[in-house]
Amino acid sequence: MQENFSLKPYNTFGVDAKAKYFAEVSTTDELKDVLSFSKTNTLPLLFLGGGSNVLLTKDFDGLVIQLNLKGISEEVLNENEILITAKAGENWHEFVMHCLDKNFGGLENLSLIPGNVGTSPMQNIGAYGTEIKDIFVSCRVLNLKTLEIALFNLKQCQFGYRDSIFKQEGKGKYVILEVSFRLTMKNHRIKTEYGAIKTELENLNIEKPTIQDVSRAVINIRQSKLPDPKQIGNAGSFFKNPTIPLTQFQELQRKFENIQGYPNGDFVKVPAGWLIEQCGWKGKQIGNVASHKLQSLVIINATGEATGKEIFDFSTEIINSVKEKFGIELEREVNII
């Protein structure tokens, strides 16, 4: 247990906020011990995985716990499927690469997403036509009140777009210890329809892609558009892509002929990056904070000296300008602390 601890190395924005108490845990027993300490001292809790989806706007007057639970196990289900279980502290991209090295399919489109395995179900992470819910089987969680372990299946997690029970009624009630996925060993389903994957595969002269080829294409695309948090502070996509009624989208089409949208029944998903770019934010910098020059959906700590409040205020200005121009209110995808 450490006191007055700097969290700058533990969040990908590189914001220098402090925690009143900090503990790194490697076992479930250690986790229960520090949770007992927090309960005895009536301390608010904050769990950090890879720190890739959080914005610290102030010092945290409580206990920050970094989950460093490690381990990956396998269980063959049938001749084509395997159950892979990874502990919460496993790095997400390294876990994806581990599965691809063994030719296990299902995670390839989720390559190079920052963060740890334990946070992946919280917001049902997704990219290039795949979401966690597509291959998710269950997750083992610890009830923070009773310190009892429970198993949540796919239905119980109530996955939605960048959403789950852990962001709704289960928020602050559980911590995820491990996650299990159903992957393929032979008959892989190759997904190349979404985004620029087909174009990138053509650039690589690949006509019949493997799951490894798809992963390579996704990595190339992400590296070309998104800044590396190790080089410049960011949390990836800062905003969710808004979903609006079809009637509202049609009204916007009459005013903005080139507006982009992806229909889904009576609703249309509109790319937040496009909306932000149309409002003149792409590459724009105010003080220490900027919108990335290649991807306006990404807010960066441009100087390395930005405070969490500066980043939050910058995001508020973007929200206000998009709402004023399009009548659409963007929602932050990053967790604000």
Image (cartoon, helix red, strand yellow):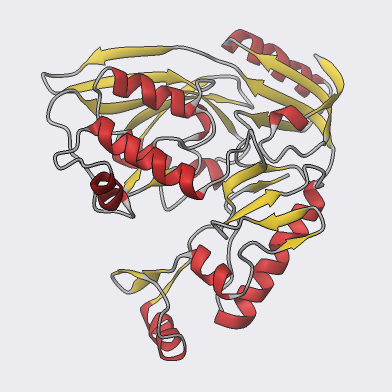
Q: Which residue is at a point 77% across and 39% down the rendered structure image? A: 15
Q: Which residue is at a point 81% across and 30% down the rendered structure image? A: 62
- Across and down, in percent, residue 248 comes to 43, 82
Q: Which of 320 and 296 is in front in this view?
A: 296
Q: So how many labels did they put on this image?
A: 0
Q: Quadrant of residue 206?
A: top left
Left or right of 79 in this view: 184 = right
Q: Nearer the viewer, residue 227 or 297?
A: 227
Relative to 113, residue 321 above or below: below
Residue extending furthest bottom? 254
Is residue 155 visible from the viewing direction of this image?
Answer: no
Which image quadrant: the C terminus? top right
Left or right of 156 in this view: 32 = right
Relative to 241, residue 57 above or below: above
Is residue 173 visible from the viewing direction of this image?
Answer: yes
Q: In which quarter of the image is residue 140?
A: top left
- Across and down, in percent, residue 9 comes to 73, 28
- Across and down, in percent, residue 237 comes to 55, 51
- Across and down, in percent, residue 60 comes to 82, 36
Which image quadrant: the N terminus? top right
